[in-house]
Image (cartoon, helix red, strand yellow):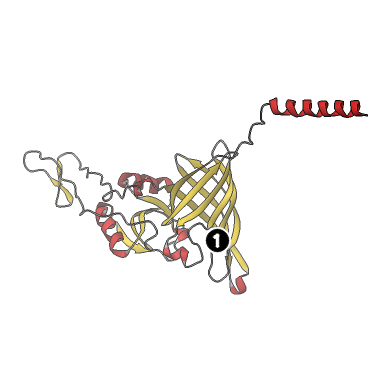
Amino acid sequence: MAHGSSGSLLRAAGALLLLLLLPPAPPAAASACSAKEFLHNGSLMEVQRCDGGALTITYKAPRPGIAQQGAGPGTLFFNGIEKPDGTITGQARLFSARCGIATYPVTGSHRNGIIALSGTAPIRGKGCRVVRHQNDYLLFTPAAPYAGRAPGPHIVPAQCPPGQIYTGGQCVPNSGPLVPARPFVPPPVQLPAPGSGDWYAIAGSFRSQAQAEARAQQLGGVWHVLHTQHCPNMTPGYWIATAGGFSKSQAQAYARSARRFGAYAKRCH
């Protein structure tokens, strides 16, 4: 019996030694995620994409109008999947202080740094019952222009036809030696933090999203496009080239910088 017990102990010791000599198992791979800041309808958003394509969009600094409806910093706005080709599917959230949160499916894409989603959002009536649906367009543009608080909007120099010069805010016939055009330069404008107001500078409204984007690119800086679907007080069915949301005075300053396009300031509510 003693001999048998000794053999068992030797076998157990050998098994333990073998376990100690084996290389440790590699740790489970953690899901890597990256986060970037985007602008959406005057709110600063955080877009997080993880390995496998999981995509979430949360509010980082919601504009006052949406904050009054129940969205705060860290509130989830969208969750879904982004495929390798940039195609996106998932659920967006509609906020209402009266009726709470409603979700609805959206699809779209992530192209050239811009996220564009669309779906049919529920419209709730009395008793918060869904009475109909309407097309909803969700656009997210990179928030890089806010980094470092750049001093004012980018201005594109005015272009006049041959034989004319730019002076006094307009093109006039050149009656003398050709002189360099002096483009309008607005007073310095300190960029406000996103979500600091419901006022927007509007430099054109278009039926085509591409036309609105072209105008916004001409202006550069924080100018972007927005569908009037997000502003019930505006004429539905248009894309606008805009900068905002700001306070009224800040929106007016941006409008002055784009007055060659007939820009004006308007509240979104």
| Residue type at tag 1 | Leu
Choose between 150 and 179: the one closer to the eye.
Answer: 150
Residue with the most extreme bottom position? 126
Q: Please state if 260 lies on the left or on the right of 181 as rendered.
A: right
Q: Position of residue 115 (x, y in %)?
A: 48, 46
Q: Is residue 234 visible?
A: no
Residue at the spot of label 1: 94
Q: Position of residue 255 (x, y in %)?
A: 28, 57
From the viewer's perspective, is residue 266 above or below residue 80? below
Choose between 17 and 88: the one closer to the eye.
Answer: 17
Location of the C terminus by quadrant is: bottom left
Q: Please state if 33 lies on the left or on the right of 161 as rendered.
A: right
Q: Is residue 220 visible?
A: yes
Q: Please state if 13 lies on the left or on the right of 256 as rendered.
A: right
Q: Position of residue 184 (x, y in %)?
A: 19, 50
The quarter holding residue 102 reads bottom right
Q: Residues within 10 Å of mark 1 (few under 14, many from 20)?
A: some
Q: Please state if 13 lies on the left or on the right of 236 as rendered.
A: right
Instruction: Give the residue at x 40% y 48%.
Output: 143
Q: Position of residue 75 (x, y in %)?
A: 52, 58
Instruction: Give the residue at x 27% y 55%.
Output: 190
Residue with the most extreme left position? 176
